[in-house]
Image (cartoon, rainbow, N blue to C red):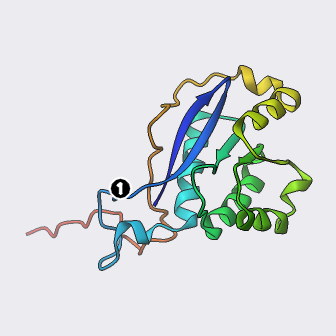
């Protein structure tokens, strides 16, 4: 399972993307481990909720420590970027995810950076106003909360079952 851990680097928020062996606390689908049940949409729901909750107006994903980036996750991120209309920057992307970014014509909007430092220089030049934004409400160094997308669960799965009255 991927984890997303916000870190403050210089004056920007960088989302470190790491592989984790940690299990989700509740079973999602009977017979399937919670780790296997999470798909790209679930990760992106968590990122979306985190962006809304923090009111951050950009996001930098650091893939330097993660070599296997699921294609469905990256595809969902591209869809989210279209919906929220904020800069999504990527650092440390390997060749396979880079090819997927090319297929979405991502580089016509933003470059892909070899290091986080390069993305900071870009932010300073292109979006200096974002460097002064408040980071209130962001918990640095702790993974963002992962929740299962209702679209991927069974109907009523997350809702309590009403008890029958006598």
Coordinates of residue 113 in the picture (x, y in percent)? 78, 45
Q: Position of residue 67 (x, y in %)?
A: 60, 60
10 left or right of 45 in image: right
Q: Residue at x 41, y 75 (%)?
A: 154
50, above or below 100, in the image: above
**Front in this rendered view, residue 74 or 9:** 9
From this viewpoint, which residue is outermost toward the bottom? 31
Can you name the residue that lies furthest to the right here? 108
Quadrant of the image for the C terminus?
Answer: bottom left
Q: Which image quarter: residue 21?
A: bottom left
| Residue 70 screen position, x and y as percent | 60, 67
Residue shown at 46%/66% (left/top)? 38
User: x, y (%) of residue 20?
Assistant: 43, 55
Q: Which residue shows up at 44% across the image and 47% down it?
A: 145
The residue that label 1 is drawn on is 22
In which image quadrant can residue 93 be found? bottom right
State the count of labels: 1
Q: Residues within 10 Å of mark 1 (few under 14, many from 20)?
A: few
Instruction: Name the image quarter holding residue 16.
Output: top right
Q: Looking at the figure, which quarter contains the N terminus?
A: bottom left
Left or right side of 124 for 80: left
Point out the residue furthest to the left here: 166
Mark 1 element type: loop
Q: Is residue 52 above or below residue 79?
A: above
Name the residue: 84% across, 64% down: 102
Describe residue 14's horizontal placement relative to residue 24 as left or right: right
The answer to which of 117 and 86 lies nearer the viewer is: 117
Q: Nearer the viewer, residue 146 or 123?
A: 123
């Amino acid at each position: 399972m991927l984890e997303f851990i916000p870190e403050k680097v210089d004056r920007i928020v960088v989302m470190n993307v790491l592989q984790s062996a940690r299990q989700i606390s509740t079973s999602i689908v009977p017979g399937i481990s919670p780790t296997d049940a999470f798909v790209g949409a679930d990760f992106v729901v968590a990122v979306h909720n985190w962006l809304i909750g923090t009111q951050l107006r950009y996001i930098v994903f650091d893939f330097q420590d993660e070599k296997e980036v699921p294609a469905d996750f990256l595809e969902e991120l591209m869809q989210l970027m279209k919906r929220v209309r904020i800069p999504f920057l990527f650092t440390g992307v390997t060749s396979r995810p880079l090819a997927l970014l090319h297929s979405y014509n991502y580089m016509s909007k933003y470059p892909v950076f070899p290091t986080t430092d390069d993305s900071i220089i870009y932010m300073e030049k292109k979006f200096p106003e974002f460097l002064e934004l408040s980071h209130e409400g962001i918990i640095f160094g702790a993974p963002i909360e992962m929740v299962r997308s209702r679209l991927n669960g069974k109907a009523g799965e997350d809702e309590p079952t009403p008890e029958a009255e006598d």
